[in-house]
Image (cartoon, rainbow, N blue to C red):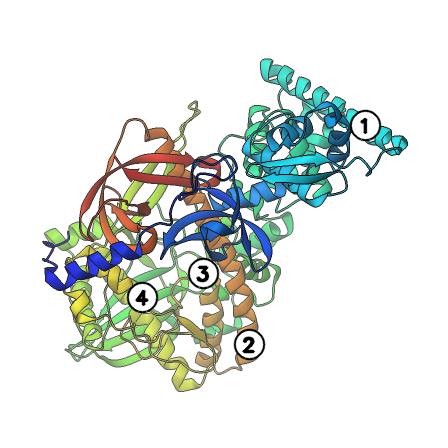
Amino acid sequence: MPGKRRGLGKQSSKIDKQSKKTLAAPARVSNLPFGDGLRVGALIEFRTNHALSLGVIEGSNRGKWIVRDQIGTEFSVRNQDVTLLLPGKEYTRRDVRDFLEDASSMDSNLVQIAWSTAKELPEPIKLEDMARIMLGGTSPQSLYSAYAALKEQTKYFRQAGKDPPSYHRINSSIDGHNDGLEKARQAHAARQKSMKSFADAVSEALKDPNKRGISRWEGGPHEERIRALKDLALGPGPWIDVRNLAVESLRALNMSLTPNGAVTLLEELGIVDRHAPLALIRAGMAQGFDAKLEAEAESIMASAVAGASHPEDIHRKDLTHLRAISIDNKGTEEIDDALSIEHLEDGKVKIWVHVADVSRWIEFGSKLDLEGMQRAIAMYLPTETIPCFPWMLARGTLSLNEGKECMALSTGVILKDNGEIESKEIILSRIKPTNNLSYSDVDEILEKGGDTDVNVLHEMVKKRAKWRTKQGAISIDLPECVVRVDVKNGEEEPEVLLKKKQDTPAKAMVEEMMILANEVAGIIGKEAGLALPYRTQPPPMPLDKGLLSKIPEGLCVAAALRRRMTSVVVQCHAPGCHASLGVQAYVQATSPIRRVVDLLAHRQLKSHIIGMAPPVNVSLLESFLSKMAQYSHLRSKVQTNSENYWIAEYFRQNMSTKTWKGLVLIWKKKPQRIASVLLLDFGLEVPVRIVRDINVGDTLELCVEKVDVKSGMFRLGEK
């Protein structure tokens, strides 16, 4: 828990006064079209570098608005550069993209038809009237689509006024061209008829549950529209004509003209399951494995059951006499590692870190190997785990299962009394795990005693952690949030569980042993001149001691230190120091079932152990790592999007009944008054805009202000 907040003193009071001047917002503008004044969250068109852009106001600084466009580019915008303020409140960058796409999908015939229809209206014609004529309404999307179309097609109307926008018909433009106008009217009438027919069919299906489901639409007159809606809802991005058809279909139903609007419609029609894994589907990522990969996995399993030998097995050392303990989360199915203690004749203790030898079974360059590289990392979604390799292998042959003889890559280390490495080795081994324990099991053992091996390991861990701290290791103790979903049969609404993940002695023990094994891999790789994925990290950026003294101790200091940490760099030719871990060389090699980069490291290390040429050189390894980094980034993004979806669902379920206590950790964007706030109940960090004067270390009572589950968007604010 954070310590007592220290007083800021006179000097910081001056800083606070100066910052208030800096944070002053530009004067509100009340004479813009549709606007009651500019504000944070407003959607505006603005002029920059002689071009017009659409963006959302995210804050203000030094008398200018901070505006971001659809790709996140930031602009400083003066009041006089704002050319249009759309109605509505609290827009986001997603809305900017959606408004632009809606405008681009509008029927090109509508401006020409509006020219004819508006003949009887008094001029100048207001934009609201033009939107009604062209799109049948005056929603913000309709207003902007009409505005953009009139700005682009200047053949039929000229703008008469800007405040608010109004238009004059250009009489000389198409007078006498009745044939073209009639064709435009016919094309538009046909589209309107089709849209009405579709809307009627949807209305009928929603009234009768027996008419829901994809089969209701297959082979019918609206099959193409349903396909277009599925492409918009679930695809990575449909062709423009397909998207336009989907948007037109949503417009006919007066629904949100977005991918998530399409998802909502398809859910109501029974075509897409509620809570379908949108992030996974949209990324085009497979949840299972195709038949050929499953067949290859079955062949490997059969080989393991038959006890088939492998040429490299002559290099294996039999360590089945050692008690091997695996420690992981309760219910873990992919068991990568296990720990042993060996008491030597000279009285010394040797630590063994055993890691599953996946490369013994997955052949380099095989179809399974290539599939694993493309998956890169196992994905732990709130609803399921998607492994790198078929479950029959990940849970079975590859895993260090209790009571089974397993192939491993074992790291043996003897420590000096101060925790420094005295001797080290990595060998091919054969082990027989004796205990698969959970973290809670080991925490109980450490508390009550009774297991000599576990207690000896714990003492070694304390020595090792103390040694790394002396080498400059940095520990940042901030809680994390774990998202889990309990899907109950017969209940439409699943229970979303947000839990605080914190370090325990058992977790610290396993983490310390993995760091030790990975350091040994790096040292041996360096000594042998091996190409390996060496992870390096420069020292953190210094934090001003005067500033640090003003930050409340505990969680707030940890957040400030985290912000100063530098990025990890992977290089293949030679190791460098890893500053935050306090080690001179580091290679991740302890999770080859869940992280395929570790499998690459295993193959390189094994080649050195058995005296063979490594399978890849520096250049080829860099190529592999570059591709896998892209795959890993995409899968991590899917995992984050999935978690955000379910967190948003949690807040939706509880928005009217609960509030949450939050701790202000750090200012993320102080000019915009956006702070990072830690929800103390379950360790979730959220950005919160705070208008009133407040300090880091203060606590807030937060409630849900807005939530959009399908977008994974939620916004909390002070109650």
Which of label 2 and label 3 is nearer to you?
A: 3
Tell me whether the residue at label 2 lies in contact with that at label 1, contact meaning CB atoms closer than 8 angstroms.
Answer: no
Q: Residue 185 shows which numbered tag?
A: 1
At numbered mark 3, what does the secondary structure look like: helix, strand or loop? loop
Residue type at mark 1?
Arg
Q: Are marks 1 and 4 in contact (CB under 8 Å)?
A: no
Q: Residue at x 45, y 71 (%)?
A: 602
Residue 595: which numbered mark, if any? Answer: 3
Asked whether disc 3 touches disc 1, contact meaning CB atoms under 8 Å apart, the reply is no
Separation (CA) of disc 3 from disc 1: 59 Å
Q: CA distance from mark 3 to mark 4?
A: 14 Å
Kind of residue indicated by mark 4: Met
Which of discs 1 and 4 lies nearer the camera? The answer is 1
Q: Secondary structure at mark 2?
A: loop
Can see residue 345?
Answer: yes
Which quadrant of the structure image shows residue 352?
bottom left
